[in-house]
Structure formats: structure tokens, C-alpha cells
Image: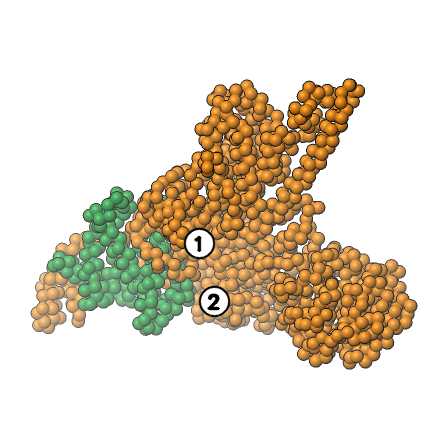
Chain colours: A green, B orange
């Protein structure tokens, strides 16, 4: 528990290695948490990515000790990247199932997943997101927080340490940028 | 401006003209940039719903069924071979470490996997030692990891083992359990018998071998709990039917504590049928299952083998409601098997399956077989067969035509039996013989025959008595084995029950040993003076004490009652020893006299000057010579003197051997005398008769304080101020072993068996060692000052150990060795599925509220564990809970709901929300759009003792006061530099203080009388250490002292008024997370818990560790005492809450209190 807290503090003090350490921890936590949650739920229940990330935060971080804003930003950045990978995995599987790549289990899997959006869009965004990160890392971070984790305008603003208005603008820009890239490809 | 900034600014321009103008300036002629921005703006209008659904969800559907070909751990599924309510059974191939075929049973979802596996693990060792040809071994158990595919997520196995810190992250808690068993290719026993038309005799033979298998398990301490035909399979080996009992340990692992009806129902569905269940199992008392429950189930099985149906028939079961079936099992007497057979509508086919005519079947079963079955099916298990082998033997007796034990013996019955056995010889005269015996008629028959019949009858009765006695012993042995296993799984109540059921005449060492594990508190004799020495009378009944006030007192060693008092010396008495006959006492005192007393008359019989007490105390300076006690030795200062005191003359004028007061000890045969040496001085062994020096023993580096011979005289133990005890071989002089203390050792004693050695001294801990291995078997803590004298009770094993200390107490310990668990909880609450953060007692002590991760709060009864409210107080986490005084109708909680924190007040009975405050006040806006998890900072709540005010603590260090009725904020009371981790009011009647503990370890004391005023400075400030988000401060009941966790794993106790540090309590092996003061005994007891998983009880005045409660397997995060101080409750990261009984029942031979000493307040704890 203190691990993540101390990594966050290191990250808050500008240790670049800290963020690197954070991702696998958060990634594992999110997956296990999802698994644990889903198994306790009855069939057909769903989990919101946002709730998952919040819960992971409560579990991993000694909240009272953690410095409020700077450290949380690092956590959310890591969580967003982790959630992106998880969701992309999920979407890829789904596509594979659709193509019949995993015959025999197809029907069961089809009913198992009811993501509210086309997997294609998610995968498409994922493919070009790294290019956006090269051009505009802030925009890419915001996309992860908003698109994959589901934070809203003000939440992303707080996590990134920008104004709500900026958050709104960056989102508009990122959407246009990504849409253009995807359409071009 | 960056591309994005230009884009954003342009987006905000109202019309195309403005935008164009803006872009002209912003791009400053950079045409590609302008083109990019323009195309992005263009794109922006075509986005539609692109990326607008902002959150993803993951969903779960029914997990896939296991299928042949799948690999589970080292097992590859081959084909499905069975299916039941439990789950599915596969034939599987084990690949490593040996290649073999096994049966693999996958349990269907719905069980708490972690618990199932944990229970199995607890049983595994016992299961491993079962080795019987009729038992199919359970080889393994494991968890099928949840395949993330089922959730739309994938988990790679190698990463799942990381982060052992938190169990929720442990994959064990996810997935489904499976059991691996020896593969048995058989069919249920009933089916086998019917398909093969087995006659009754052969059925009975098969059944007897089932009993033998069960008996084997019982002797290993394993109860099957689920004996039924589908678990008793028959296979053919070399053409012979062989019984295999399967599924041992599975039922126990699946759930032994079925207290809730719903659970029971589910359980029944899972195991398929309650038809074979004993009344006590059906009663759902949960834990109260023993070997006799299996006997019942065997009875049902036998019933079915004989009659073709179970006592409660399957048809009945299908029709009746579940509760009705339970009632029938518990209350209704079943039909006798013979009655069932004759009343059966399918008698013809039942008889045909047994190759017998219908009329004869009923007749065959009537009588003995009825009795045997009905004895198994007794509702009162005390009336069933004690053991499975007892049942088997009775069946075998029936088969051998011997009288069975199952029936009330009557001469007629026995004779009939006898006669039948001698059918050939007796032939026609048997009837006559009966007549001869009964009527003593002098008929003209062979008297020889009658005589022989009589003799055989006597012999047969003798044999029966023998087998009855054997059975009794076996049953006793079972109870002990079971009690041991119950205790190792921390089931104290059950252990005691089993132990109490052991017949008194069969209670031996192991019984006492287990009893000892259940009770740890000594009998404490207290006086207003220091105790320098203690001695048991030769019969162990009385105890003599040497007091600092010159008094010698005689106590009842079992009750602690004072029997006799006399003034022995004008100064303090330093030494007291019993004469071997028990009627005289020798004492030595600070008045430099040694005296002998007659206990009957109270008269002084002998007196001599003796300088024994000038240094080192001297509890060991006087001794009577065994066996007659005529000689008295005193380790005088510089002189060892022996007196033939009865004739009033010195027997041997030994002089000038040493320069200091010496401990002395006679060998048990009285022939040798050992005298201790001063620093660097040799210890010596003398021949008492001749005065000859027999041998010297190596010296300690510091003076010797006490000596003790082993009971056989072969070893001598010497305790020394060099903090060690050395044991020498008295023949060879060889040093055999050394035992180390952390302070000067002042006393030593061998147990009467010589197997154990006790020693104690300035480190206050009485240590009991295994004399052979040198292992410390007991560390008895409780003395507040050094221990000066030790004495074992003279019973053969030395069950009790008395220790005398200047702290004014003699403690009589139960000295049989103790294993790891020093304390035992009275209840473990396992309803939480997540880590605990906070626990609190209701003001009346009848309820506990507990909460933590996951946010779910549970209100439950500390006596039964019965949950009265399951309240989702918060969605993600509950940091802190508090009951509202004085009536306890409401509970306040601080916690996190998704991204937000909130403080909520809710009804303790219904959970209905009364009011709550969220983040509103913090951000100043009415409904903040955003609140990240830690932006909302309520971590602590506390009610003022009058219940009018609610105080909250926040992350920013603010302590705020609210109107507890309306939820209106009163104002900010004060502030810490760091986050608030805990809040607590002083509990005295007009509570004066409020303590707030902050993350930087600062504990502020606020004036609780002025809650409605802002207090710029706290009344006082203490520096403690607050390592976790827990309440680790507590006030003594009078509010005058404060306890808090300190640095280096300590607990510090301060005086609130002066700020003076009173005590530092040391003993935890990790950070202290939580402390609590007991309301009882004027705040003498402090409880603490923390990282090392231990709950410790301290004497806050003496600063000593009193008790150690072990049992948690994770960090102890919260503690609370019941208002009467009788119970302590502890919440842990191991997801359990344990209730510790601070005053368990005290009916043992080591009672926990004595009533005759005024002002005694030392023993309220036990």
C-alpha cells in the first residue's frame, strides 16, 4: 500500500522513473479489481471504468498521506494508460470472436460482452493516439482520462492541472485531430 | 501559440470572419499550420458522436463450463464422469510430478473460494495421514483462476501473484475451488448391492468395512460429515467388491459454519440431500459436529441397505418444505427397519434384491438389526455408538451370532443367543437348559451342559465389559484428537466442550495440556507486602509465603483462600520451606535468624542465628534434608551450617567455605548437598554424611542465586546473576545446557517429572523450559516486579507453578506447556469480504458496527455474530464509524462514495440516512462538478459524549463541529498541519477533552467543554506516531491519561493535565495502528494492535504486557472495548473481526480470582 504512495510522492517531486514504476502496479490492480468485482456480481452486471479507477486509487494509495493534487495526477495518468490497455485488449478479443477466430466459445463470448460502443472506434483511437501524444502530450493524456477512464471535463482538468475551459478546448482539439487521422487512414 | 491553442481560440470565435481574421494573425504566415488548423476546425463540425460515450463498461456473463481438454493447474480434464449439486466431476490426468489419472471435482460458483481453500488447507495435514484401503485419498485442492475471457478481460497468470500485501488482490479470492481425489471407478454402495442382489449378510459385511474406513478417519481426527451412498462407492478388485469412501475433508472445506438458514438451504442444495444428515447437523448449530454425526449417517446408510429406503424417505423429502425435513430429522422417531420393510409397498422387489422371501426379510431384520440401526439413529448422540468400530463390531457380532451391545441386555436374550450358537450341541436340550436356568428345576438333564452354559455366559459378559471399556477409551481418544484439531483452528468453545465430555477417570496429560491451551490466566494471591519466597506443601494443597512484613501466610493453593497467618520474623521473611512431612516450616528472616515452626500449633520449635540474607535475597538459602527432614541446612554468610534441629544440635560444623550467603539444595535422596558459589567461585557438591567435597562444578561469572536438583538427582540447575541458568550433570560435572534470560536470574525449579525447568528473575517473565531440548515452552507474563522464588506443585507432572514477587503477588500458573496461541477469541466474524478499518461498540455494548474497504458497514451482535444490519454506508471505503451516545440509535460514518467523500448519519437499525454532508462546504460551490478521491477529506468522526455534537476531521487538518441533530455546521474548532486520522473524546462522565490525531503524529487535546468556540491553540499537544489512517489514540476512563502509538513500535501513556510521559509500552514487532483503554478497573488495561497482527493487553500502570491475543493474520487496524470492559473487538486487514473475551469463565482448577484479599484489583482481567 505504501509502495504506490511513495512512488506517487517521488513522482510529485519530479522523479521521472516513478511514473514508469507506477503503470504496472496500477495495471495489475485494475485488472484484479475488475476480476474480483465481476466475480462477486451476478451475471449481467457491469462495471464502470471510472468507478474502477477510483476504487483502485483508494486501495493502492494511503489517501490521507498522499499529497492532494500533484500526486493524484500521476496516478490518474497511469490508471488511464492502464485502462486503455485493458479496454483495447477487450475490444480486440471481441473482434476476434466476431471473426470466428475463437470458434467453439463464440456464442458465450458474444453474450459476455456488451460494451456500449463499437470496438472499432476504440481500436481506431488507440492506433493513432500515440501519434497525437508525439504532437501534443497533454491532449493525448486528456484523451486517455476522458475516453478510457470516463472522467468529465472538470475532472480531467483537475487531474491534469489545467483550467476547465482548457480541458474543454483540448478535448475539442483532440477529437478533431484524432477523427481526422482516423478518416485519413 | 501552439496548433492546439490556435485551434481552440478560433473555435471560440463567433463567426467565420472573426475566425479568419484571428487565424491570419495567429498563424503569422505559416500556411501549413493554418491549413491544418482549418481542416481540424472543419473536422470538428463533422465529429458527430465520435468519442462521446465517455466511459466503458465491462460485463460478466455466466462463466464457461469446464470442458474436456482443458488444463487446470497440473491436471488435464479427460471426460466428465459425474455431476451433482456440488459441481462437476471429471476424470483428469495429472501430468506432474507423477502421471496418473485422478478425479477432479469442480465446485460450482457461489462459495467463497478463499474460505473453502483455507478450510481445506487447515485440514490438509490431517487428510495426508489417512491411509486406508477403503478410503479414497483427497490429493489436492486449488482454485481455477477466473478466466478473464469471461469478463472480457484477460489476466496473465504470472502477474497475478504479485503484491502479496492485500488479499483482495490475491487471485485465490477469485475463481472456483476444485478438489482432486484418487480416481475410483465404482458405483454407490446401495446401487451396487441392489444391482448384484446381495443378501443381507453380504450387505452387512460391506457395511462393516465402511465403518472400519470411517473409524480410521476418526482416529486421525477427521470427520466425514457427508456420508451417503454416492460418497461410499464399491469397486471390483479381483472379483471382490471393495468399498471406497470418497470426499473426506470436502464437506468441511465447503462450509462448517452454516448458521444462516439461507446458507443452509443453499448448502443442502449443493450437497444434494439432507437425508443422511444427523439431527445436530440439521439443527444448524454449525460447529457442533463430532464423530457421532458420522455414526448417525452410517445408521441411515445401513437402514437403506436393509430396507431400500432412508428413514426420511426421498418421497417425503420431495413433498415437505425444507424446514419440515429439518424438523423431522431432529424430532421424529424413525420407523424401525423391520417395520418399514413389512409396511413397504415394494416389499417383494426389496426382498428379491436381497435374495430372500418377503416374510423372512422382515423377520431377519427384526430384533438385533433393528437395535443396531436404531442405536445409530438416536437423536441424542450420547446414546449412539461411541465409535464407528463399535458399530462395526456389533455388526460383526450379529454376523457371528454373538449378542450385540445395541440392546438392553437381558439374561433371556443372551441365553437365547448362546443357545443358538450351540445349536448342534444343545439341540433339543436347549429349551430344557433355559428352563433349568430360569426355574432351577431339577429336571433330569445334563447338569454339565447347564454348567457349561453358565460359564460361557460369564465369559461372554466379561468380554463385553472389556470391549465396552475399550470402546470408551477409544471414544475418549477421539475427543482428544478432535479437541486438539478444533483448537488448532481456534475454535475454543468447541474444544472446551469436547474436553468436558471426556470422562474424568480418563483425563490424562493430553487432556490437561489442551485445557491449559484454553485457559491462560493464573490464580493471583495478593497481599499488601512483597513476597520473597513461596513453597508448596508436600501434598500440594497449601502454599506458604514469605512476606516482606515478617509474616508467613499459608494459603489454599487452589482457591487462594488464606488459611493461616503468623509473624515469623521481626524483619522481612526471605525464605520459607516445607518440611517433607508437611507439618513444619523453616523460615529465614532479615532478623538474621533461621527458625522452624510447627504449623499445627503455630509454635516456634527451633531458632538459630543465620546470616543468610545479607545479599542476593536468599529464597534458596534454607533446606530440609529429605526424606525425613531431620537435618536443616542454611547457606549462611560465609558458612554453610547443618543442624540436627530435632535434637537441637549442629550435625556438621562446616565453616568458611564461602564468603557470601549461599543458596543450598539437598539432592532428593538427601545424600548430597549443593552449595552455590559467589562470582567466579565454584559450586560444590558435598557428601552430607561425611562432609566430604564430592565435586566442584564450573563457576558462573556472577554469584549464584538459586540451586535446584532434578528429581532423580542426576542434574543440578544453578541460576545466576549472570542472566543464565546452567544445568550440570552431577556425576560427570558436565555442563548440559544453558538457558538465557534478559535480566538477573533469581530463581529456578525443576518440575517433579524432571522434564521441565522453570526460571525467573529481574526480567519479570517466568520462563518454563523443556529441560531436554532447552526450548522455551512458556513465557508467563504478569509480574510487575522481579520474580524471586518459584515452586512447582508436587503432583507428578507439576501442573502448577507458583511464583513470588515483591510486586505483592504470588501467581499460580497453569504450567503445562503452551503452543503458539496465548489468547483465544470468543468469536471470529467473517462476514466482511474486505479489509476492516474501523470498529465500534454501541453505547449499551450489545452491538458492534464494523466497516472498512468496500464501504459496507455491518451491525452485529458480538455474542453470536448475527448481523442485524448490512448497510452500504459508503461505496468505496469507510474510514471511521461512531455510535451516537447516549442511546446509540444512530451511527456516523466517514467514507468515500466513488470519487467523493462524505460524512453520513444513519439509523443504526434500518440504515436509513438521516443526513449527510459531502464536499459542498469544502469547495464553496453548491454541487461541485469534480471531486477526486482525495479532494474530499473526511477521515474521522466522533460524537461528543452527550451526543449533541458531531466532530469531523479532514485531510487539510481541520477539526470541525456540527450539530448532530440537524447536521448544521457549528464552526471550525481547530487545525492540524496534516490530515486528521482519528478523533476521540475522553469518556468520563462530563468528558473534558477531545483528542485529534494527525498524520504527522501530533495529537492535540482540545477542551471538549468549549466545542462551540474556536480554539486557536490546543490545550496540549503530544508527539506520537500515527502510521496509518486509524484511530490510535485513547483516553483512560477518567480522562486523565492518554495513550497513543509512539516511535519504534511503542505505545506511550501521558498524563493529560501535566503532559508528563508516564509509561512507554514496548513489545510490538511493528507499527502500532490502534490503541484502546478498557473502561474496567480504572483504566488499568490498554489494548493495542498493529502491523504485527497481534492484539496485546498491557497493564498501563505497571507498564507490563499482560496478554497476547493471537489469531489475526493481517494488520490489526482497529480496536474497541465494550462499555463494561468484558469484551474487546479487533478489526483487521485479514477481513475478520475478532471478539476477545476479557473474562472467560473461571471454573477450572486455576480460578482467576480470589475474593479474600481486600483491595485486590489485579485479576479482573481474566
Front residue of B925/B1020: it is: B1020
Q: Is residue B669 left or right of residue B152?
A: right
**What is the number of the mark on residue B476?**
none
Marked residue nearer the N-terminal end (2 or 1) = 1
Rendered-image quadrant of the C terminus of chain B:
bottom right
- Chain letter of mark 2 equals B
Tags 2 and 1 on a common chain: yes
- Mark 1: which secondary structure? loop
Q: Residue at x 47, y 58 (%)?
A: B1133
Q: Nearer the viewer, residue B816 or B266?
A: B816
Look at mark 2 in the image and give the residue it sits on. Answer: B1027
Circle 2: element type: loop
Q: Comparing marks 2 and 1, which lies closer to the viewer?
A: 1
Considering the image in quadrants, where does the N terminus of chain B appear?
bottom left
Q: Residue at x 41, y 48 (%)?
A: B177
Q: Position of residue A123 (x, y in %)?
A: 21, 56
Toward the viewer: B676 or B1040?
A: B676
Image spot of residue B310 (x, y percent): 51, 29
Can residue B756 be seen?
A: yes
Q: Position of residue B346 (x, y in %)?
A: 48, 21
Q: Nearer the viewer, residue A51 or B781?
A: B781
The quarter of the displayed image where residue B1106 is located? bottom right
Q: Position of residue B975 (x, y in %)?
A: 46, 68
Mark 1, residues whose alpha carbon is within 10 Å: few (<14), some, or many (≥20)? many
The reply to whether residue B788 is in sight is: no
Image: B1027 above or below A90: below
Is B529 left or right of B77, judged from the image as shown? Answer: right
- Residue with the mark numbered 1: B834
Disc 1 chain ID? B
Q: Are marks 2 and 1 in contact (CB under 8 Å)?
A: no
Amino acid at each position: 500500500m505504501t509502495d504506490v504512495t511513495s512512488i506517487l510522492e517521488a513522482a510529485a517531486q519530479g522523479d521521472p522513473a516513478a511514473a514508469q514504476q507506477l503503470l504496472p502496479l496500477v495495471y495489475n490492480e485494475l485488472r484484479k479489481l475488475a476480476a474480483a468485482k465481476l466475480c462477486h456480481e451476478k451475471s449481467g452486471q457491469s462495471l464502470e471504468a471510472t468507478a474502477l479507477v477510483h476504487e483502485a486509487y483508494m486501495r493502492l494509495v494511503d489517501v490521507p498521506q498522499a499529497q492532494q493534487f500533484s500526486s493524484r495526477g500521476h496516478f490518474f495518468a497511469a490508471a488511464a494508460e492502464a485502462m486503455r490497455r485493458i479496454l483495447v485488449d477487450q475490444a480486440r478479443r471481441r473482434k476476434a470472436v466476431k471473426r470466428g477466430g475463437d470458434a467453439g466459445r463464440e456464442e458465450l463470448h458474444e453474450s459476455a460482452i456488451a460494451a456500449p460502443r463499437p470496438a472499432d472506434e476504440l481500436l481506431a483511437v488507440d492506433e493513432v493516439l500515440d501519434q497525437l501524444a508525439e504532437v501534443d502530450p497533454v491532449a493525448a493524456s486528456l484523451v486517455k482520462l476522458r475516453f478510457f477512464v470516463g472522467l468529465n471535463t472538470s475532472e480531467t482538468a483537475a487531474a491534469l492541472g489545467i483550467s476547465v475551459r482548457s480541458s474543454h478546448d483540448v478535448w475539442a482539439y483532440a477529437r478533431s485531430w484524432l477523427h481526422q487521422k482516423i478518416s485519413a487512414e | 501559440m501552439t496548433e492546439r491553442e490556435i485551434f481552440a481560440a478560433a473555435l471560440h470565435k463567433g463567426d467565420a470572419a472573426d475566425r479568419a481574421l484571428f487565424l491570419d494573425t495567429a498563424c503569422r504566415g505559416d500556411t501549413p499550420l493554418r491549413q491544418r488548423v482549418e481542416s481540424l476546425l472543419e473536422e470538428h463540425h463533422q465529429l458527430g458522436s465520435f468519442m462521446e460515450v465517455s466511459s466503458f463498461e465491462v460485463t460478466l456473463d455466466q462463466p464457461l463450463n469446464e470442458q474436456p481438454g482443458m488444463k487446470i493447474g497440473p491436471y488435464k480434464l479427460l471426460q466428465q464422469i459425474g455431476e451433482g449439486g456440488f459441481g462437476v466431476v471429471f476424470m483428469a490426468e495429472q501430468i506432474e510430478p507423477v502421471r496418473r489419472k485422478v478425479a477432479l471435482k469442480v465446485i460450482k460458483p457461489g462459495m467463497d473460494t478463499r474460505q473453502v481453500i483455507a478450510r481445506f488447507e487447515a485440514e490438509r495435514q490431517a487428510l495426508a495421514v489417512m491411509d486406508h484401503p477403503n478410503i479414497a485419498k483427497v490429493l489436492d485442492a486449488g482454485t481455477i483462476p477466473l478466466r478473464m475471457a469471461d469478463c472480457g478481460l484477460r489476466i496473465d497468470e504470472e502477474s497475478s501473484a504479485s503484491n502479496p500485501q492485500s488479499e483482495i488482490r490475491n487471485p485465490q479470492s477469485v475463481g472456483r475451488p476444485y478438489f482432486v481425489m484418487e480416481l475410483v471407478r465404482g458405483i454407490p454402495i446401495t446401487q451396487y448391492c441392489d444391482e448384484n442382489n446381495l443378501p443381507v449378510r453380504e450387505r452387512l459385511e460391506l457395511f462393516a468395512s465402511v465403518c472400519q474406513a470411517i473409524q480410521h478417519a476418526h482416529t486421525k481426527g477427521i470427520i466425514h460429515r457427508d456420508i451417503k451412498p454416492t460418497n461410499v462407492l464399491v469397486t471390483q478388485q479381483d472379483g471382490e467388491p471393495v468399498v471406497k469412501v470418497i470426499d473426506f475433508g470436502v464437506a468441511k472445506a465447503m462450509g462448517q459454519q452454516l448458521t444462516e438458514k439461507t446458507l443452509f438451504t443453499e448448502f443442502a442444495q449443493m450437497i444434494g440431500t439432507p437425508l443422511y444428515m444427523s439431527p445436530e447437523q440439521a439443527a444448524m448449530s454449525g460447529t457442533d459436529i463430532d464423530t457421532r454425526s458420522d455414526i448417525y449417517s452410517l445408521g441411515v446408510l445401513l437402514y437403506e441397505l436393509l430396507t431400500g429406503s432412508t428413514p426420511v424417505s426421498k418421497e417425503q423429502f420431495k413433498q415437505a418444505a425444507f424446514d419440515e425435513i429439518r424438523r423431522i430429522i431432529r424430532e421424529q422417531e424413525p420407523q424401525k427397519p423391520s417395520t418399514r420393510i413389512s409396511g413397504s409397498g415394494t416389499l417383494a422387489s426389496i426382498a428379491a434384491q436381497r435374495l430372500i422371501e418377503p416374510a423372512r426379510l422382515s423377520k431377519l431384520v427384526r430384533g438385533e438389526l433393528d437395535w443396531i440401526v436404531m442405536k445409530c439413529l438416536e437423536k441424542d448422540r450420547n446414546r449412539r455408538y461411541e465409535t464407528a468400530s463399535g458399530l462395526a463390531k456389533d455388526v460383526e457380532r450379529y454376523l457371528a451370532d454373538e449378542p450385540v451391545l445395541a440392546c438392553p441386555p437381558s439374561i433371556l436374550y443372551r441365553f437365547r443367543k448362546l443357545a443358538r450358537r450351540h445349536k448342534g450341541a444343545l439341540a433339543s436340550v436347549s429349551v430344557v437348559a433355559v428352563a433349568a436356568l430360569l426355574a432351577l428345576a431339577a429336571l433330569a438333564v445334563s447338569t454339565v451342559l447347564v454348567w457349561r452354559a453358565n460359564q460361557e455366559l460369564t465369559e461372554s459378559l466379561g468380554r463385553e465389559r472389556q470391549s465396552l471399556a475399550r470402546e470408551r477409551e477409544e471414544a475418549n481418544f477421539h475427543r482428544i484428537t478432535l479437541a486438539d484439531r478444533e483448537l488448532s483452528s481456534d475454535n475454543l468453545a468447541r474444544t472446551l466442550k469436547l474436553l468436558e465430555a471426556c470422562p474424568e477417570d480418563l483425563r490424562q496429560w493430553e487432556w490437561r495440556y489442551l485445557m491449559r491451551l484454553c485457559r491462560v490466566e493464573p490464580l493471583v494471591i495478593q497481599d499488601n507486602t512483597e513476597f520473597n519466597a513461596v513453597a508448596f506443601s508436600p501434598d500440594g494443597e497449601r502454599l506458604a509465603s514469605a512476606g516482606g512484613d515478617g509474616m508467613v501466610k499459608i494459603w489454599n493453593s487452589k482457591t487462594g483462600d488464606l488459611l493461616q497467618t503468623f509473624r515469623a520474623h521481626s524483619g522481612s521473611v526471605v525464605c520459607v520451606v516445607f518440611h517433607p512431612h508437611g507439618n513444619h516450616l523453616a523460615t529465614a528472616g532479615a532478623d538474621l535468624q533461621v527458625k522452624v515452626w510447627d504449623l499445627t500449633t503455630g509454635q516456634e520449635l527451633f531458632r538459630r542465628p543465620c546470616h543468610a540474607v545479607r545479599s542476593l535475597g536468599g529464597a534458596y538459602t534454607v533446606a530440609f534434608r529429605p526424606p525425613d527432614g531431620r537435618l536443616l541446612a542454611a547457606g549462611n554468610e560465609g558458612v554453610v551450617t547443618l543442624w540436627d534441629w530435632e535434637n537441637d544440635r549442629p550435625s556438621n560444623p562446616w565453616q568458611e567455605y564461602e564468603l557470601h550467603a549461599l543458596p543450598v539444595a539437598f539432592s532428593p535422596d538427601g545424600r548430597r548437598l549443593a552449595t552455590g558459589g559467589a562470582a567466579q567461585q565454584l559450586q560444590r557438591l558435598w557428601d552430607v554424611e561425611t562432609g566430604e567435597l564430592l565435586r566442584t562444578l564450573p563457576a558462573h561469572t556472577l554469584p549464584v542465586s538459586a540451586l535446584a536438583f532434578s528429581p532423580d538427582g542426576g542434574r543440578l540447575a544453578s541460576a545466576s546473576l549472570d542472566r543464565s541458568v546452567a544445568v550440570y550433570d552431577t556425576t560427570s560435572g558436565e555442563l548440559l545446557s544453558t538457558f538465557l534470560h534478559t535480566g538477573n536470574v533469581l530463581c529456578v525449579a525443576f518440575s517433579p517429572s524432571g522434564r521441565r525447568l522453570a526460571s525467573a528473575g529481574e526480567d519479570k517473565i517466568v520462563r518454563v523450559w523443556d529441560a531436554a531440548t532447552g526450548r522455551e515452552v512458556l513465557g508467563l507474563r504478569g509480574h510487575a516486579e522481579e520474580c524471586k522464588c518459584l515452586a512447582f506443585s508436587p503432583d507428578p507432572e507439576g501442573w502448577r507453578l507458583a511464583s513470588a514477587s515483591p510486586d505483592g503477588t504470588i501467581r499460580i500458573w497453569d504450567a503445562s506447556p503452551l503452543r503458539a496461541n496465548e489468547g483465544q477469541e470468543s468469536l471470529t466474524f467473517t462476514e466482511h469480504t474486505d479489509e476492516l478499518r474501523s470498529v465500534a461498540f454501541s453505547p449499551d455494548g450489545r452491538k458492534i458496527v464494523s466497516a472498512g474497504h468496500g464501504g459496507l458497514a455491518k451491525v452485529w451482535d458480538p455474542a453470536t455474530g448475527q448481523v442485524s444490519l448490512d448497510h452500504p454506508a459508503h461505496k468505496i471505503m469507510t474510514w471511521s464509524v461512531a455510535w451516537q451516545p447516549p442511546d446509540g440509535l444512530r451511527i456516523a460514518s466517514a467514507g468515500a462514495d466513488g470519487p467523493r467523500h462524505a460524512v453520513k448519519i444513519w439509523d443504526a437499525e434500518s440504515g436509513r440516512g438521516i443526513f449527510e454532508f459531502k464536499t459542498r462546504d469544502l469547495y464553496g460551490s453548491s454541487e461541485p462538478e469534480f471531486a477526486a478521491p482525495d479532494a474530499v477529506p473526511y477521515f474521522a468522526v466522533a460524537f461528543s459524549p452527550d451526543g449533541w455534537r458531531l466532530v469531523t476531521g479532514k485531510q487539510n487538518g481541520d477539526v470541525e463541529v456540527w450539530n448532530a441533530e440537524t447536521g448544521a455546521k457549528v464552526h471550525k474548532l481547530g487545525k492540524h498541519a496534516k490530515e486528521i486520522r482519528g478523533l476521540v473524546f475522553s469518556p468520563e462522565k462530563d468528558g473534558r477533552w477531545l483528542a485529534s490525531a494527525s498524520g504527522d503524529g501530533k495529537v492535540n487535546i482540545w477542551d471538549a467543554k468549549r466545542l462551540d468556540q474556536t480554539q486557536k491553540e490546543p490545550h496540549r499537544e503530544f508527539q506520537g506516531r500515527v502510521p496509518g489512517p486509524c484511530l490510535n489514540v485513547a483516553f483512560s476512563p477518567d480522562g486523565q491519561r492518554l495513550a497513543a502509538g509512539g516511535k519504534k513500535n511503542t505505545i506511550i501513556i501521558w498524563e493529560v493535565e501535566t503532559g508528563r510521559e508516564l509509561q512507554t509500552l514496548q513489545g510490538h514487532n511493528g507499527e502500532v495502528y490502534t490503541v484502546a483503554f478498557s473502561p474496567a478497573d480504572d483504566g488499568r488495561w490498554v489494548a493495542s494492535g498493529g502491523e504485527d497482527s497481534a492484539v496485546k493487553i498491557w497493564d498501563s500502570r505497571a507498564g507490563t504486557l499482560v496478554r497476547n491475543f493471537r489469531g489475526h493474520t493481517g494488520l490489526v487496524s482497529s480496536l474497541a472495548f465494550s462499555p463494561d470492559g468484558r469484551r474487546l473487538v479487533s478489526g483487521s486487514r485479514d477481513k475478520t473481526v475478532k471478539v476477545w473475551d476479557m473474562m472467560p469463565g473461571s471454573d477450572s482448577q486455576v480460578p482467576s480470582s480470589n475474593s479474600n484479599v481486600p483491595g485486590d484489583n489485579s485479576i479482573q482481567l481474566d
